[in-house]
């Protein structure tokens, strides 16, 4: 079935309308992590370093489990295009099942994180503080993944505005809770890094309650939570087969960044703190591309469900161009205003301020280089998920990030002695390989899969 012909401006308008709330939602989501980083940096550099390594640890495991949530998005989009309302309910429910089971499975790895961090060479004080953070924040894996599933379900139905507003409210709540529990304001105890973990946990639970209430009240026809306990083997298998490769792909990419955090930790607390700041700034700009990628997944899923190759191809080209424009804008920001951006994460009186600024400025220059390739690989992955192609992209990601990116980071950083700049250069190389291979895969697979 063909849709009405859409021009490139029409595609741009449609992707913008769908993508802006998703971008805003992702920015609000990353604001939670950025708030943790900023306030821990205000508390102490030691807390910032521990928060950086703990955040990377949590996010690595989170991305693996989030594959099931990301699988729900193209499946629901395609089923919606086919008019299969029962199928929408089935795959969303089983996405919740798989996400909950995964969160329970990895909880012990969160609770006993300290010895694992010591085992990969982190300083004892950093490992101890990061372990204390994860002892609390680890329980947040359950609500965080369940929220991701319902967000994917709502986004695939193009209800992106509510996803945006729920995330905004969560970010504000997290900032207020951080202010109270990290520094001991408003009568709360001063808990430092544990306070940041507690604030995140409370925020995730509140977010889950809010988004569940919305789904029940606004979309009662799907009966999403009626007889939720009943298994659905066919739908569970479908979500699992699509979601596991997505999760492994996400694990491969975030594993690349987590490995660089570990390597920066070998260089010392101050380089690790500078890495944390630069990584947070890079993560903020990446949310622009991720929002476009999600919009691409939804629209590609709709076109795939209708077998409309022309619609899919035009929309894909528009998504690539929009990502390129955003990459150029953020590249200029990183190169022109590095010190004001880095300074947001530190107190003026911080003793290590000048050293962090010097290291962070160099890292942001490298980050400016990988804006283009990072955005391109994100768009390609989103489009491939839309046409339900995840296994080969998983292999491409694993090879690009682990076989190429991580070894390059180590060799450039430590064998050739370039330090943090070398470690981050490995990121650029790994992401560049991924962007080229994934884009090649999409255009070849699209032509073959949709006649």
Image: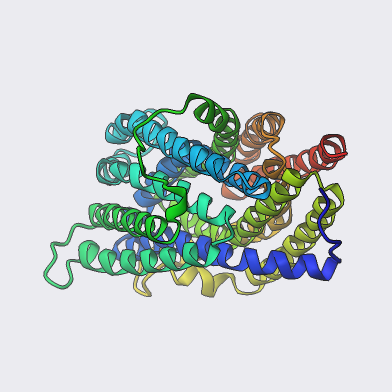
Q: Is residue 235 above or below residue 82?
A: above
Q: Is residue 262 visible?
A: no
Q: Is 202 on the left or on the right of 260, as rendered?
A: left
427 versus 40 height, above or below: above
Q: Nearer the viewer, residue 44 or 195?
A: 195
Quarter holding residue 319: bottom right
Asked if residue 22 can be seen in this view, the reply is yes
Q: Position of residue 176 (x, y in %)?
A: 28, 69
Against 122, residue 296 (above or below) is: below
- Image quadrant occupied by the C terminus: top right
Please state the total of marks drawn on the protein image. Answer: 0
- Most foreground residue, 46 or 188: 188
Quadrant in the rendering for residue 353: bottom left
Q: How is the image coloured?
A: rainbow
Q: Nearer the viewer, residue 119 or 290?
A: 290
Q: Is residue 329 above or below residue 355?
A: below
Q: Position of residue 227 (x, y in %)?
A: 35, 37
Q: Is residue 286 left or right of residue 181?
A: right
Side of 17 where 226 appears, left or right: left
Q: Does residue 2 appear left or right of residue 148 in this picture?
A: right
**Which residue occupies 57% across, 62% down?**
22
Looking at the picture, how far across and down is residue 211, in whole percent?
39, 57
Where residue 106 sits, quadrant-wise, is top left
Residue at 48%, 62% in the rendered image: 163
Q: Position of residue 236 (x, y in %)?
A: 50, 29
């Amino acid at each position: 079935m063909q849709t009405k012909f859409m021009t490139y401006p029409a595609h741009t308008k449609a992707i913008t309308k769908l993508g802006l709330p998703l971008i805003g939602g992702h920015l609000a989501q990353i604001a939670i992590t950025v708030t943790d980083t900023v306030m821990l940096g205000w508390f102490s550099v030691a807390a910032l370093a521990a928060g950086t390594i703990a955040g990377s640890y949590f996010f690595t495991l989170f991305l693996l489990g989030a594959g099931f949530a990301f699988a729900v998005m193209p499946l629901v989009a395609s089923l919606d295009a086919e008019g299969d309302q029962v199928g929408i309910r089935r795959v969303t429910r089983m996405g919740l099942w798989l996400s909950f089971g995964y969160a329970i499975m990895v909880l012990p790895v969160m609770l006993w994180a300290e010895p694992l961090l010591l085992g990969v060479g982190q300083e004892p004080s950093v490992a101890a503080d990061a372990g204390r953070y994860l002892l609390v924040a680890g329980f947040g894996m359950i609500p965080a993944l369940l929220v991701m599933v319902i967000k994917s379900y709502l986004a695939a139905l193009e209800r992106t505005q509510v996803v945006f507003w729920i995330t905004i409210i969560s970010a504000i709540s997290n900032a207020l809770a951080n202010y109270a529990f990290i520094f001991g304001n408003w009568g709360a105890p001063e808990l430092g890094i544990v306070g940041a973990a507690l604030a995140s946990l409370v925020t995730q639970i509140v977010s889950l309650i809010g988004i569940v209430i919305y789904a029940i009240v606004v979309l009662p026809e799907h009966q999403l939570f009626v007889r939720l306990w009943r298994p659905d083997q066919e739908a569970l298998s479908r979500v699992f087969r699509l979601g596991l490769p997505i999760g492994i792909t996400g694990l491969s990419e975030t594993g690349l960044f987590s490995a660089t955090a570990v390597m920066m930790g070998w260089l010392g607390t101050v380089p690790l703190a500078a890495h944390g700041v630069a990584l947070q700034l890079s993560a903020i700009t990446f949310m622009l591309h991720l929002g476009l990628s999600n919009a691409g997944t939804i629209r590609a899923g709709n076109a795939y469900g209708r077998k409309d190759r022309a619609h899919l191809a035009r929309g894909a080209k528009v998504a690539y161009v929009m990502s390129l424009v955003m990459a150029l804008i953020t590249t200029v920001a990183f190169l022109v205003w590095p010190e004001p951006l880095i300074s947001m994460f530190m107190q003026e009186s911080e003793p290590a301020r000048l050293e962090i600024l010097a290291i962070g400025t160099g890292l942001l220059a490298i980050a400016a280089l990988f804006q283009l390739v990072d955005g391109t690989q994100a768009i390609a992955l989103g489009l491939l998920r839309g046409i339900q192609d995840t296994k080969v992209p998983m292999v491409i990601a694993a090879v690009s990030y682990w076989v190429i990116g991580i070894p390059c980071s180590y060799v450039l950083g430590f064998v050739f002695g370039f330090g943090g700049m070398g470690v981050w250069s490995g990121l650029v190389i790994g992401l560049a390989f991924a962007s080229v291979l994934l884009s090649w895969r999409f255009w070849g697979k699209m032509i073959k899969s949709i006649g």
